[in-house]
Amino acid sequence: MAMLEPLVAFIVSLGFLLILLYKRVNVGIALNATALLLAFLALNWQKIPEIVYNTANEPLTIAVVLATFGIMLLSQLYKETRVINSLSESAGRLIRNSKIVSSVLPAIIGLLPVAGGALMSAPLVDAQTEKLGLKPEKKAYVNVWFRHTIFPVYPLSQVLIITSALTGVAITSIIIRQIPVVAVMVITGFLIGFWQSSTEKKGAPNTAVEESSSLNVELKRFVVAFSPILATIAVVVGLGAANVNTAGLDLFTSTILGIIVLIAIAKPSFNILAKPLRKREIYGVTLAAYGAFLLRNVAVTAGISEIVKTFAVNGNIDVIVLLTVVPAALGFITGSPSSGVAISVPILLGMLTFSPASAALLYINAFLGYVIVPSHLCLVFTIDYFKCSMGRVYRYILPSFAVSLIAALLVYFFA
């Protein structure tokens, strides 16, 4: 028998999740522990082993967990082989405009889903924005904001994969809806970040022959370094466009191909290949993928969505309001877009059947809520690096958040 009313159990479990995340407990452990606590509080205990087992044996769960592991392994190998350094350095030398370089390099580093990864791009942004005479708080804003412009349209984003799996909407369908929002994010970042910046000082130009030769070398270097990611994305998009039924294994297959290409390029030693497998970060993020499905299944079994639906109908709350406020608030409160999506989906399932429009709106709101949270590691590390106050950086981040949110709503209603 249930120990507590489902809604009370859900609120208690959410509070438990917030405590774990506040204590910096790995999000994978936190999501699974929260799902189990909710099950113990709201369900007949005899059902718990069955839910855990069934979740672990769902083909889509297996596919997403494997894909998440593959993506994390690929990103860690990129870092350990230093191919990511080659990628960012070649991009910086190909692009001669410091404003563009300052916005592109954080996004390139953002291809690696590493917690606090903005710290990797901070020195590069610092060197470029120094030429433009930007203040420390604007340097910090440029680094944080442009790092995150890539995620809404990046097929290998774990949060995007989880959103697609939980809502049943194809990744490519969500990405198409995000393209206008990303365009607005980039334009907003340029207007706010580089407004009234100084004129860049250029060094003495090389001869035409030297410059052409240098560009060819750097272009080749960039293409080679980017090819593992390009191969991975090409397979995902190609299978999606061909409507090939892979039971969700297209992402795992594509990441394996990306890893093979990366190994062929970098020719790493066995120690470098094995090093990522010894890092807890890979397993924590992989566990989070399973935890998202487990939390969804427990919440649905407990009838959380039906209870929220009743409250929404009785209170005349518009679904669009819930689709906007719930994921944004949960992304902000938990400081984790994965948690924001994993909790939002079962809440909203009773009120709507997810379409590309609603899945995209849910994702971008959870993501934007996470970007502006003060405990966001990218923000914390960047502010520490540039030695500026969080309040001054928020003067630029909050307007960017507002504009991006409005853009997402406009896309939902009119696209």
Image (spheres, grey):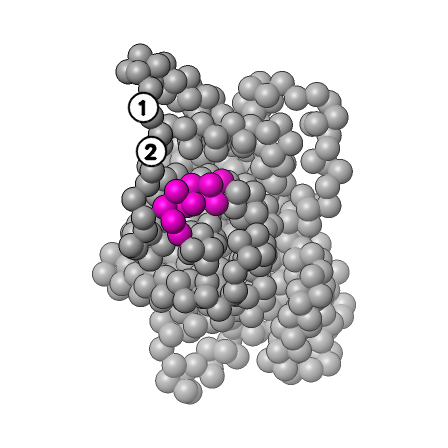
The secondary structure that most of the magenta stretch takes on is helix
Residue drawn at the location 33% of the way across and 38% of the way down = 201
Disc 1 on helix, strand or loop?
loop
Work out whether residue 304 or residue 318 is closer to the camera in this orientation and state it: 318
Horizontal arrangement in the rendering, residue 26 relative to residue 129 (left or right): right
Task: Please name the residue that numbered disc 2 is placed on.
Answer: 202
Horizontal arrangement in the rendering, residue 214 relative to residue 262 (left or right): left
Query: Magenta region: which residues?
Result: 124-134
* Residue 251 drawn above or below residue 57: above
Residue drawn at the location 62% of the way across and 78% of the way down = 11
Measured from the top left, where is residue 209 in percent x and y?
31, 12
> Which label is found at residue 205?
1
Q: Is 318 included in the stretch rendered in magenta?
A: no
Q: Amino acid at mark 2?
A: Lys
Q: Amino acid at mark 1?
A: Pro
Q: Quadrant of the C terminus?
A: bottom left
